[in-house]
Amino acid sequence: RPRVGVLALQGDVREHVRMLDGLGADTSLVRRPADLAAVEGLVLPGGESSVIDKLARAFGMQHPIRDVVAQGLPVFGTCAGLILLADRVEGAIAGQETFGGLDVTVRRNAFGGQNESFETALAVDGFAGPVPASFIRAPLITEVGPRVRVLARLSDGGVVAVEQGRLLATAFHPEVSGERRFHDRFLARVREASLSSR
Ligand code: GLN
């Protein structure tokens, strides 16, 4: 069973754990650098990216996470997790940092506040049929680098799901909609990566 960690500093950790357990992963909570040693993949949950960033730095997690991303650990970020993976952020709060690794620019709260949260159905590259997507104070991907593959766009063209090597990120919350295919794709990456490192 793939051993997967969920960064558990703040955010919708439980929803990811439930989804991953349901897909047969051996899921653990990651809070300290030592917790990273046991995992073959990492999920960065939705929540509040500035809070997760602050806690990650307070817990000494920023550099260890940067290191595992650089080493090719498969990582899946949703919403705030996407922001934390992004190399560039528009609308960050003062002093907010990211782990980075994903060559994109994201705009925080691109659709406005909580009242502008919405659900829609998306076409996602490689998935058959519509994908329910729940946007909650969601970011938008406003620029993608050359190694980034766009997986989904809103009807106005805005980019909301991307992949770059072993990094996968969505502006929305499949873990909230019960949409399993992104987690499946992430777990497939985890299995590939752990086979190739043997
Ligand atoms: N607006 C949040 C942030 O900037 C993200 C919201 C979410 O994860 N649902 O981190």
Image (tube, rainbow, N blue to C red):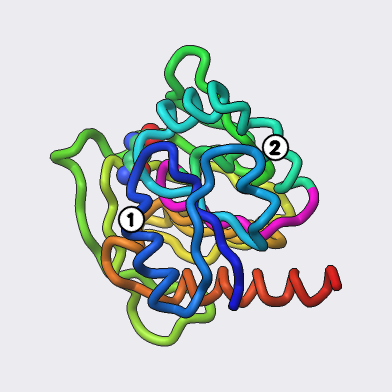
Q: Which of 91 and 51 is in front in this view?
A: 51
Residue farthest along the left direction in this orientation:
115
Q: What residue type is labelled 1?
A: Arg
> Where residue 95 sits in the image (x, y, percent)?
52, 14
Q: Do the residues labelled 1 and 2 touch (CB within 8 Å)?
A: no
Ligand 1 occupies quarter:
top left
Report the magenta residues as a range: 71-80
Q: Which amino acid does label 2 sit on?
A: Pro
Q: Nearer the viewer, residue 121 or 41?
A: 41
Left or right? Give the position of 60 relative to 18: right
Q: Can see residue 59?
A: yes
Task: Check mark 1 vs ligand 1: CB closer than 8 Å? yes or no.
Answer: no
Left or right? Give the position of 14 relative to 102: left
Task: Check mark 2 vs ligand 1: CB closer than 8 Å? yes or no.
Answer: no
Q: Is residue 161 magenta?
A: no
Quadrant of image for the C terminus: bottom right
Q: Which of marks 1 and 2 is nearer the N terminus?
A: 1
Q: In this view, does 157 lie above or below 125?
A: above
Q: Can see residue 138?
A: no
Q: Residue 64 carries which label?
A: 2
Q: Does the magenta stretch include residue 72?
A: yes
Q: Residue 14 carries which label?
A: 1
Q: In this view, does 158 lie above or below 58?
A: below
> Where residue 41 sits in the image (x, y, percent)?
62, 60
Q: Nearer the viewer, residue 197 or 83?
A: 197
> Where residue 129 sits in the image (x, y, percent)?
36, 85
Identify the residue shown where x is 44% and y is 69%: 20
Residue farthest along the bottom direction in this orientation:
128
Left or right? Give the position of 131 relative to 119: right
Quadrant of image for the N terminus: bottom right
> Where residue 29 sits in the image (x, y, percent)?
48, 51
